[in-house]
Image: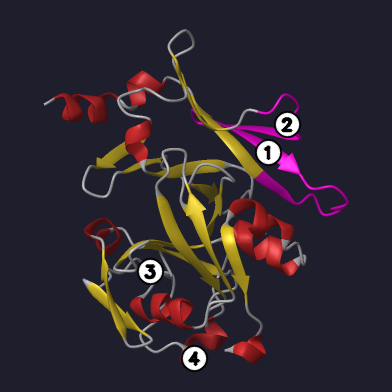
Amino acid sequence: MKTNYDSEADVLSLSTDVRPATSASLLDDPDIVVDLAESDGHDIVGLMVMWASAYLPLKKGYDPKGDTLLLGTKTDSPDLITENSDFVGYWRAYEGEPDGFMDPVGVLIRDASKHLAPVITSLAR
Amino acid sequence: MPVGSELSSTQKDCPGCGPASRRRLPASITAGGKARVVTRYLQDNARPGITAHRVGYVLERWLIRGVRTEDGGRQSICYIAFVPGLTEMVRVAVSTDDERIINAFPDRTATRHWNKGNRDYFVRVYQDVEVRNENQL
């Protein structure tokens, strides 16, 4: 997974090697753009976190026990959980939507300290 | 089915908008007679399909405008509109002083809610939401 933090814009981006679709989804809260794979509209292949300083260095949303970083919400009973690389996506379906229309409500990053190590190191300098 | 794709047949409606290639955005974009600075990050990291023309188009011909507030109280003003050449609505976020364009991307979530007529989504996610129809543009 590639990571990059732009301190001037306060934007953190994470991406896998999978090419994302042209369009992206948005978490309800906070302002996080979720890139999805072209081949499967529910496979999360990248994130762009606006106002990322709230999360760095591993503050908000970080669970040191599991070394996970949660962005957004991990609902008690998500309608769909997807796993792609170290991204775990939590999805909510909309009532009365027969075509399976879902929104991402949260993304968990596994091995967060490993993936964000380059960013954290650069912040410490 | 791909989540989002471009409509090549409508490229002629968008001068300077090529296929889904990554282009660098200019340092400023003028729309409605107002020039706004594009953040360096966005200049360097414009998504495929996001061009200066399309960003300006959204700022002038938005269908939805609302304020987005983050946990820390930081806010942005978001403009959302369909643009020529793309199947998805584009969301452009501008600083609250209306001086800087800070983000722009084809927004799958907004598009699907809009197409379903689910206006509640926009009320839930944005504050001070304004909605325009084609007749008001």
- The mark lying in front, picked from 4 and 3, is 4
What residue is shown at x 59% (from left), y 42% (from top)?
A: A43
Q: Is residue B3 visible?
A: no
What residue is shown at x 21% (from left), y 48% (from top)?
A: A8
- The mark lying in front, picked from 4 and 1, is 1
- Which of the marked residues, 1 or 2, is nearer the chain's N terminus? 2
Of all chains, the one bearing label 1 is A
| Element assignment for label 2 | loop
Report the span colored magenta: A75-103
| Same chain assignment for discs 4 and 1 | no
Q: Which residue is mark 4?
A: B13
Report the Cα–Cα distance between label 4 and label 1.
36 Å
What residue is shown at x 69% (from left), y 56% (from top)?
A: B121
Q: Which residue is mark 3?
A: B21
Q: Which residue is mark 2?
A: A78
Whether B128 is among the magenta residues is no
What residue is shown at x 66% (from left), y 57% (from top)?
A: B123
